[in-house]
Amino acid sequence: MIQERKNLLILAYVQQSLVAGYKIGYETKKERFYSWLGGVHPNHRNKGIGSALMAYQHEYCRSEGYQTIETRTKNKWKGMLILNLKHGFDVIGTYTDEKGDPKIILRKNLLRKNSMLQYDINILFPPCLCYNR
């Protein structure tokens, strides 16, 4: 499935040969990017890694001309829901997935002024690995 995605972006924060955090996304429409997967290892949480990876992904999306970024999460993943809301996402809907779990759809307008909290994305360098196809 990942081979078929257009404009795939994979970001990874690596510390001492361990992937401490990652963010993966791809284009779904010419003007929309989908933030698909992301996470931070439990030993590296609350250090700003998730926020920095998200900020980097959003800056990349702006530079590529995307107008919106979309993601989906579950209510049980409160940390991810809160992080998305802090970064300017709006809840635009809900649905029930194939497993019967409710999911929350969030979207962020990348063109809106002040739509991004300011995070020092430089905390990632080094070490951050980026892959774009």
Image: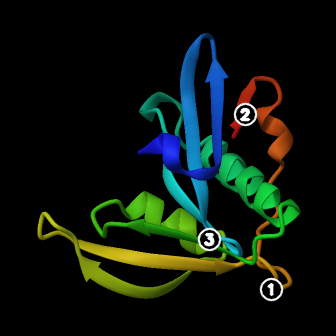
- Which residue position holds label 2? 130
First of labels 3, 1 by sequence position? 3
- Coordinates of residue 124 in the picture (x, y in percent): 77, 34
Is residue 99 rendered to the left or right of residue 120? left
- Coordinates of residue 2 in the picture (x, y in percent): 47, 43
First of labels 3, 2 by sequence position? 3
Give the alpha-carbon distance from disc 3 to disc 1, as whole Å: 15 Å
Picture layout, residue 25 above or below residue 10:
below
- Which residue position holds label 3? 86
- Which residue position holds label 1? 112
User: Dividing the image into 4 quarters, which one contains the C terminus?
Assistant: top right
Q: Label 3: few (<14), some or many (≥20) within 10 Å? A: some
At mark 1, the secondary structure is loop
Between 43 and 126, the residue placed more toward the observer is 126
Is residue 50 rendered to the left or right of residue 110? left
> Please, what is the three-letter code of the amino acid marked with disc 1?
Arg
> Please, what is the three-letter code of the amino acid marked with disc 2?
Cys
Is residue 37 rendered to the left or right of residue 68? left
> Please, what is the three-letter code of the amino acid marked with disc 3?
Lys
First of labels 2, 1 by sequence position? 1
